[in-house]
């Protein structure tokens, strides 16, 4: 009797609505590479909405001077409320309305995963000095910042969110395991990758990767991920899922560092204060 092995891949879907004053900024990013493929495969649809189309009056004004004085212009609430209500229609109230703003919660891989479970997201790109507070309070259901720096607007942050979320949608990446080993997926930075040639300009690929010894490779990769995180982002260690063996390796790294002259210089040579391990 023939046994048929059926492999099924889970496939997801997501619709993004993006409200922006500059829809042209998105062309290149959405028409190349992963987002292009995801759209062509019907896994993702993206609708760009020009906020100016929802402004009224002859000049379709979308910004105004701040009450109380001060520099810069503020995005008016009326066009944003009108746009969100028209775009979402009956789905208003059941779709996350995300304002991209440096005042938002920090966008991390965990947030990307959380958003990837939705079927539809609406992103509002702020511009100018800011957005009227009533949009923050009564229209947005979530506020996201992509980092502690200020950009000219929310368009690039929206692209970041769309790409990070899209690659987590089942079916978008060829290899379903690919997102599992990502940097940050397990709370650690990813281990180093190498490909051919085995020696490039005198720099050889680590022997263990050529050994074919799977268990040793897994162990080496784990240690490299731990080392890299300890060197570059020690703040991540306290919330990463670590085994007793991981902690033993980290203590060994710390002991090596302490025995070296200079004490608090890590292997990259820049000063760190945070390489002390969180206490167990
Ligand atoms: N708009 C301007 N700067 C931003 C940031 N860092 N994150 C999200 N939106 C922004």
Image (cartoon, helix red, strand yellow):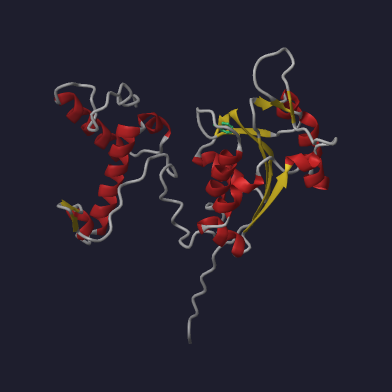
- Is residue 171 shown to the viewer in this render? no
Residue 106 place in picture, x, y as percent? 54, 32
Residue at point 67% right, 51% down? Answer: 119
92 left or right of 239 in image = right
Q: Quadrant of residue 92?
A: top right
Q: Quadrant of residue 76?
A: top right
Residue 175 place in picture, x, y as percent? 45, 61
Residue 266 place in picture, x, y as percent? 24, 29
Residue 32 place in picture, x, y as percent? 53, 57
Q: Is residue 154 above or below residue 87?
A: above
- Is residue 252 shown to the viewer in this render? yes
Residue at point 53% right, 47% down? Answer: 164
Q: Quadrant of residue 253?
A: top left
Query: Quadrant holding ligand 1?
Result: top right
139 left or right of 146 in image = right
201 or 92: nearer the viewer: 201
Total marks placed: 0
Pick out the residue farthest to the right: 57
47 left or right of 110 in image = right
Pick out the residue farthest to the front: 58
Residue at point 26% right, 27% down? Answer: 270
> Split into 4 quadrants, where in the image is the C terminus?
top left
Pick out the residue farthest to the bottom: 1
Residue at point 50% right, 58% down? Answer: 33
């Amino acid at each position: 009797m023939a046994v048929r092995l059926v492999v099924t891949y889970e496939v997801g879907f997501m619709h993004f609505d993006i409200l922006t004053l500059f829809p042209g900024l998105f062309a290149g990013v959405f028409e190349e590479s992963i987002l292009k493929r995801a759209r062509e495969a019907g896994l993702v649809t993206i609708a760009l909405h020009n906020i100016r189309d929802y402004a009224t009056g002859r000049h379709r004004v979308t910004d105004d001077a701040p009450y109380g004085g001060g520099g810069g212009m503020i995005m008016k609430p009326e066009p944003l409320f009108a746009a969100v209500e028209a775009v979402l229609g009956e789905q208003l109230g059941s779709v996350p309305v995300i304002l991209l703003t440096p005042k938002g919660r920090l966008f991390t891989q965990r947030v990307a995963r959380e958003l990837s479970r939705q079927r539809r997201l609406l992103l509002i790109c702020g511009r100018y000095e800011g957005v009227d507070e009533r949009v923050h309070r009564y229209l947005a259901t979530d506020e996201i910042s992509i980092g502690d720096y200020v950009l000219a607007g929310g368009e690039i942050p929206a692209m970041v969110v769309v790409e990070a979320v899209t690659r987590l949608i089942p079916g978008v990446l060829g290899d379903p395991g690919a997102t599992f080993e990502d940097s940050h997926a397990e709370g650690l930075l990813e281990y180093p990758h190498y490909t051919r040639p085995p020696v490039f300009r005198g720099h050889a690929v680590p022997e263990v990767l050529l050994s074919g010894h799977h268990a040793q490779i897994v162990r080496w990769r784990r240690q490299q991920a731990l080392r890299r995180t300890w060197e570059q982002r020690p703040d991540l260690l306290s919330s990463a899922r670590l085994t007793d063996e991981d902690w033993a390796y980290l203590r060994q790294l710390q002991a090596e560092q302490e025995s070296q002259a200079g004490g608090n210089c890590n292997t990259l040579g820049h000063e760190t204060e945070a390489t002390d391990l969180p206490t167990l």
